[in-house]
Each structure stands twice: as C-alpha cells, then as structure tokens.
Image: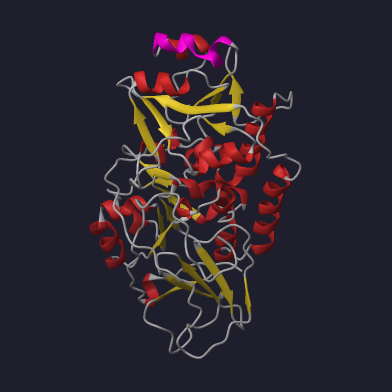
Amino acid sequence: MSVNTRFGRIGVVFVIVCMLGATLLVGCSSGANGQSASAQGSEGSVASASSASADEPTTTQVENFHNPDLGNGWKVADSLDLEYATCFSVDYYEGGYKLLCLSDGARYLTVPEGATVPEGIADDITVIQQPLGDVYLVASDTMCLFDALDALDRITVSGISKENWYIPAAQAAMDSGAMVYGGKYSAPDYELLLGKGVRLAIESTMINHTPEVREKLIELGIPVFTEMSSYEAEPLGRTEWVKCYGALLDMEDKAQKLYDEQIAQIKDIDSSATGKTVAFFYINSNGAAIVRKPGDYVTKMIAQAGGDYIFNSLDEGDGSTSNVTLEMERFYAMAKDADIIIYNASIDGSVDSVASLVQKNELLNDFKAVQNGEVWTTDQNMYQQMMQTGRIIADFNTIVTGSDADTTYVHKLK
C-alpha cells in the first residue's frame, strides 16, 4: 500500500509536536502490539545523537497514543503486527485506507490512489494521498529505509548535502540530479521546495529547535511527518520502522522481508554474557572522551552481542542527550582495563590506526585493549544504517567472542 501526498491540494494543515530530549530509555506507550538517533548538526552535515547538544527540546509523549477511531464510525479491519517497535502503529480499513499513529499523538490517514477522502474524519488526522512521492527528507536515519525498499525515487529533495551521505544510492541520486540539496532542517530553501513540488517533509526531531520552520512548511502546504524511531527503547525497534515506511509506500510485504532478514542475522547469536568488557567512545576536539549513556541503543546492541559495556556504572541522570562527556582522567580510570575498545568513527573519522588513536592522548598506550591489540573502529556510515541493526549486533558479537567471522560495520585497527 503506497502513499503519495497531494497534501497542499487537499488543504491539509496540521502541527506535529516533535520529540527529542527525554531519554532514549523512555519507551513509547502504545496500543500497538510492539514496543536514537540522529540529529543534524552543521549545514548539510549529519551527526549521531551522541553529538547532540544538551539543550534538546523535550515534549511529553502521548500515553496510549494508538487511537484507531477515525471519527466517522469506520471499524478497523486489521492491524500491522509489530515485534519491538512501540512508537508507531498501523491500522487497516476497508477500501485500502490506513491510519498511522505516532507516539507524539500525530495521526495520518493514507487514501488509496483514485479514492476520495472519507467524510467525517477527526480534525486531528492528516490526510496523505497515495502514492507517496516528491518527499523532502531531512531525517538522516530514514534514507537507509527508503534505500532498502528501493524507493529512493520517491525522495526529490534532501536535507543532507551529498558529501555527508554515506549511502551510495543517495550520493548517486544527488550526482544525477534526481535528488537535490534543499537546505538543512533549520534553513530549508522554501522556493526550491515549492519549485520541486514537494508534498511531504520527513523531519528529524531536531525540527523542534525551529518550530517556525515547521509552521512555515505547513503554511506553504507541505505537511511534516516527524521521524520518531530514535525513541524506540530496543535497537531492533528502530529497524522495525521499515514497516512504518512500508505502510506509507504500500510495500508492507517487502518491509516485512527486510525486517526478517535482520532478525535472521542474530537468530543464532548466543547473547549470554561473555565477560568481555567494551569501551565505545570517541575523543572530541577538546581532548575529552564522549561515551554513550548506559542503556541507550548502542549499549543495548553491545549487550545483545554478549558484551559488557564498561561505562554501565555511569549515572548521569535523565538528561536529554544519549552521551556523557568524560575528562580524560576519569575516562582513564573507568576504561583502562576494558578488554575491547570500539572507536566511534561515525563522529570522528580521524582514527585509522592504533597509532592515530594513541596520538589523541598518550594515556591510551596504557589501556589493556591497546596492549592486547583489541582496538576496533566503526565505519563512518554506521549511524546511517538503521536498516542493518541485526548485522551490527552480529559484528559486535564477532568482536566479543573472538570469532574469525567477517565484519561489515566495525574493523580492527593495526
């Protein structure tokens, strides 16, 4: 079932309250039967949530947000099965209509191509006319989902510049002109968006920093769909958002197949604790170590792979970012005995060898993992690969178990 929006033409106006800030540990209360994080940094650039600022805007998630009542008496014919995701739901109605509910309380009704908008639906429902196309995509995590669904042609304008995409198909689309750069979340090129006939903006929750931009898009007849996957409590819940876009694109079967492939990646993994401690971090320009908070999705992937996150004892409260800044002395005290180091090159790509890592600070020479040759680095594209969560967990498992299996998104440094 697909979705194309003739939003402006049917006069849809709505406001989505964006959510970023509450902790990534907060689960989304849903009526669905299932359960971050990227933020946009400098112009056209992409950074993971680990580099997000501490003053992220916060909103209250809607408890029991799943509301299938259209307001016109229609009854639900079926609902999308979810295993881990809890921040969206999809309900099906006779005639091919679908209702998507997000955990911020926003609701979207997709109308099949050639069908009419139902009479009497609730005022809070945003109508999306199928098939979906002419999208302005700002939420960087989402590109890999469209790519996996072979639906990149539905995106005509990118909120990320070409040099900051690590997805080859996205780069190729921008090279060919099929996709053009239309400005970052806080400064879109409105004239370009209108000229390209953009009918839907898919934003990250960073849009909440600039509510005036969201309001302007809506004023111009461009509805805003806010990507909420970063609020999923479970890593595979983020991947399961492929089903959300599968519903929007009328590609549920393909989305289910893609999701099943990621589940298969970890089917045979023994997630029992190996006893191997893992430090996941990068070093910023001030020489401080930036580590993930205990319980965020990266640390959960490490745990699901059988590793023991070395910073699990950190207690930094419920702050709005998923990272913690540690001065080197504290970092040294906590991490020097870690069995394994994984350097977060998706934020700092300057480390390509053990020697280049040690140049960051000579104290690293004393680390157990450095001395034992257990220093690894992520690919720069790891945070743009939400569709590969199962593969990344399998990579982490290869590291902590000492397997000789090939890895895809992490590599050993020499």
Residue 362 falls within the magenta-colored stretch = yes
Residue 347 seen in the current view: yes
Residue at point 59%, 46% (across, down): 387
Residue at point 52%, 39% (across, down): 298
Q: Which is nearer the eye, 217 or 324? A: 324
Left/right placement of residue 350 relative to residue 375 reads left
Image spot of residue 410 (x, y percent): 59, 28
Residue 48 seen in the current view: no
Position above or below: 132 against 9? above
Q: Which is nearer the eye, 163 or 352? A: 352
Q: Which is nearer the eye, 34 or 379? A: 34
Question: Residue 308 is drawn in which quadrant?
Answer: top right
- What secondary structure is the stretch in magenta mostly built from? helix
Question: Residue 397 is drawn in which quadrant?
Answer: top right
- Which residues make up the magenta segment? 361-371
Please count the marks in the image.
0
Residue 59 falls within the magenta-colored stretch = no
Image spot of residue 219 (x, y percent): 27, 67
